[in-house]
Image (cartoon, rainbow, N blue to C red):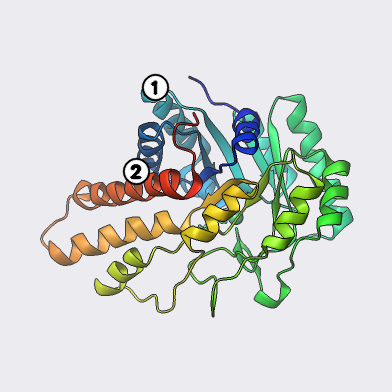
Amino acid sequence: MSLVTTKEMFKKSIDKKFAIGAFNINNMEFVQAITDAAAEENSPVILQTSSSAIKYARIPYLKKMVEASLEEHDIPLALHLDHGPDFETCKMCIDNGYTSVMIDGSKYDFEKNIELTKKVVDYAHERGVVVEAELGKLAGIEDEVNVAENDAMYTDPDQAVEFVEKTGCDSLAIAIGTSHGAYKFKGEPKLRFDILEKVKELMPQVPIVLHGASTVIQEYVELCNKYGGNMPGAKGVPDEMLHEASQRGVSKINVDTDLRLAMTAAIRKTFTEKPEEFDPRKYLGPGRDFIKETVKHKIKYVFGSSNMA
Ligand code: G3H
Ligand code: 13P
Ligand code: ZN
């Protein structure tokens, strides 16, 4: 099978009320763990690279690793640019065979966000590539842009309708209280499901995306802390809330932090328990296993995309 766009998988997700996991990748272990897990669950999956992932690993390596996974697995798989910061980065990914790009104009005002998104949509659609856009601001770090918590702005559902109509984007990331990274909530986790409900009421057929959706798995935080890490108060979006989001019309759920934690927990544990070890396969391997376990859990018990390939 070759790479696909997100069109069919999103249509299915809306019809059957489940979400598709979009997992960030930077290296081979992540690609293998995520695609092995998705294949075992017979689930569609999205692999995404931020522009800093591209700087780190470089497009030819990322693209060929993702394609290599399709030699082993027969599942719908999209390669997506996460948080494209400008037209040029989106163009570069489209020209290099990505099947989906995100243009993140959420840092701009409404009109400029529309103008930039439309420009990317025009270029992408002419080449059969789909576009995710963002309206509203998440607190935390958005791919090199640091949005202060009090600057975070929930998405306005009426503006969202106008935005989708004017830009022609294929999916929309909305801000309902999630944020990027490992410290999402100071108090109790809270999401504005009322905003999601209104958006879906107004645009039932538009695929909705949730960024900053890691659970910040406490088992991995505890392992990190136990083996020399320092992550006090790390907290994310509980599985139950993510499951509810998948039932209430979110089609794509973005996860990066949980996979980073899984890899780091395994590495820290191995380094502490086997200080004599210096073969990278002996610590990257357990990291890959933890990531695979994490992705399988999300697909099966949280997003509901098992057997939806
Ligand atoms: O939303 C941001 C993603 O977690 C990517 O982060 O820019 O550090 O690769 P990154
Ligand atoms: P997390 O930091 O919650 O994993 O969010 C990742 C994300 O939104 C990537 O775009
Ligand atoms: Zn994001």
Residue at image x 70%, y 25%? 128
Q: Seen in the image, is 35 located left or right of residue 281?
A: right
Q: Earlier in the sequence, mark 1 or mark 2?
A: 2
Instruction: Tell me, for residue 29, which label it has, or none.
Output: 2
- For mark 2, give the secondary structure: helix
Rendered residue at 65%/39% (across/down): 101
- List x then y, in percent, for residue 273: 14, 64
User: Residue 127 bears which disc, if any?
Assistant: none
Report which residue position mark 1 lands on: 71
60 vs 196, nearest the viewer? 196
Q: Position of residue 96 (x, y in %)?
A: 60, 30
Residue at horizontal 62 percent and vertical 53 percent from the top: 210
Q: Quadrant of ligand 2?
A: bottom right
**220 sits left or right of 154 in the view:** left
Q: Amino acid at mark 2?
A: Glu
Res. 206 visible in picture: yes
Query: For the residue carrying disc 1, how many other residues have a C-alpha within 10 Å: few (<14), some (14-19), or many (20+)?
Result: few
